[in-house]
Amino acid sequence: MPRFSVCQFTTDRSMAPAEFAAAVEARGLDGVYFPEHTHIPLSTRSPFFPDGQVPEPYRRTYDPFVALAMAAVVTERIRLGTGICLLTQHDPLTLAKTVATLDHLSGGRVTLGIGAGWNAEELQNHGTPYAQRWPMLRERVMAMREIWRHDEVEFHGQFTDFAPLVSYPKPRQAGGPPFLIGSNSRYVPDRVAEYADGWMPIRGRAGGADLAGLRAACERRGRRFEELTLALYYAPLDETACRAHLAEGWHELIFAVPSATADTVLPILDDIADLARRLRAG
């Protein structure tokens, strides 16, 4: 059964995370996704926007894990996702604890969308060399999985290194929440096939990756393509296009709503819920 979820830049000027999540669950949708930026350096010129400037919501995002914790308290069913968590800006021991706590307390509802980051200055402020961001992300995924899956764990890598330790609580989900890589790069199929649980690209963004390439990467890596979760970010509010995406094999469509107050957002959620009902009806 396909899933239909919603993403929002939740900020101090938008709907509160708890109010937003409760509205999503009440409409029969399947999940919420919140992005992450700890800060935006004033020198930033985004490569993803026509004028090179970073939109205001990027500058005002809440911490996604605090926001998702608030969402967890007022919901019972929906998935609680990051879209995306900039894993390269986190200490893996601290983040493993945060995510495990959220998953444990929410009853095992976390999906961890992750990325390496596009903002070189932002990464540098966290001590992450831009050229090393993807090897660092890979290593941190592996280290966090070890922490979640074992009572006693040690890890020795280039970027993450720790002697035997214990860390509780463990996530409710066996093995920990799934890691979905959010990237459109031509390199991402191999990354997903090697060490992720799924792919969460932005619809329509250039980069060179596609489902055929991901299937081929799985064959090279000896990975079953069918075991991956495929979630399409910024799905279109168009029934014909959505049906085509589902026919391609996407398991989850994630629709965007604006970073705005309830009077703007709730009618859009109603439209998304109506579309989801039609798509489920076949």
Image (cartoon, rainbow, N blue to C red):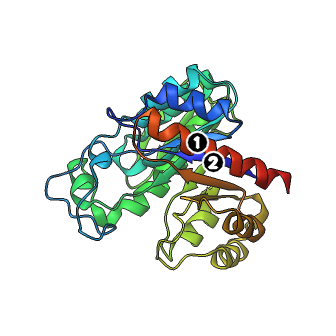
User: Between residues 187 and 162, which one lies in front from this camera angle?
Assistant: 187
- Residue 269: which numbered mark, if any? 1
- Residue 272: which numbered mark, if any? 2
- The secondary element bearing badge 2 is classed as helix
Q: In this rendering, does residue 269 appear at all?
A: yes
Q: Look at label 2 and name its amino acid.
A: Ile
Q: Quadrant of residue 230?
A: bottom right
For the C terminus, the quadrant is: bottom right
**Residue 162 percent across, percent down from the top left:** 43, 39
Most extreme residue toward the left, as rendered?
A: 43
Task: Say which residue appears at 46% left-offset and 76% top-offset.
Answer: 206
Q: Is residue 232 left or right of residue 96?
A: right
Q: Look at label 1 and name its amino acid.
A: Leu
Q: Is residue 119 left or right of residue 268?
A: left
Task: Report, in whole angstroms, how far the alpha carbon at label 1 lies from the one at label 2.
Answer: 5 Å
Q: Residues within 10 Å of mark 1 (few under 14, many from 20)?
A: many
Q: Quadrant of residue 197?
A: bottom right
Q: Residues within 10 Å of mark 2 (few under 14, many from 20)?
A: many
User: Between residues 21 and 272, which one lies in front from this camera angle?
Assistant: 272
Q: Is residue 211 left or right of residue 72?
A: right
Disc 1 and disc 2 in contact, CB within 8 angstroms: yes
User: Between residues 151 and 9, which one lies in front from this camera angle?
Assistant: 9
Most extreme residue toward the right, as rendered?
A: 282
Task: Say which residue appears at 32% left-offset and 32% top-offset.
Answer: 12
**Residue 138 percent across, percent down from the top left:** 49, 57
Residue 55 higher or lower than 21, as above or below: below
Q: In this rendering, does residue 111 appear at all?
A: no
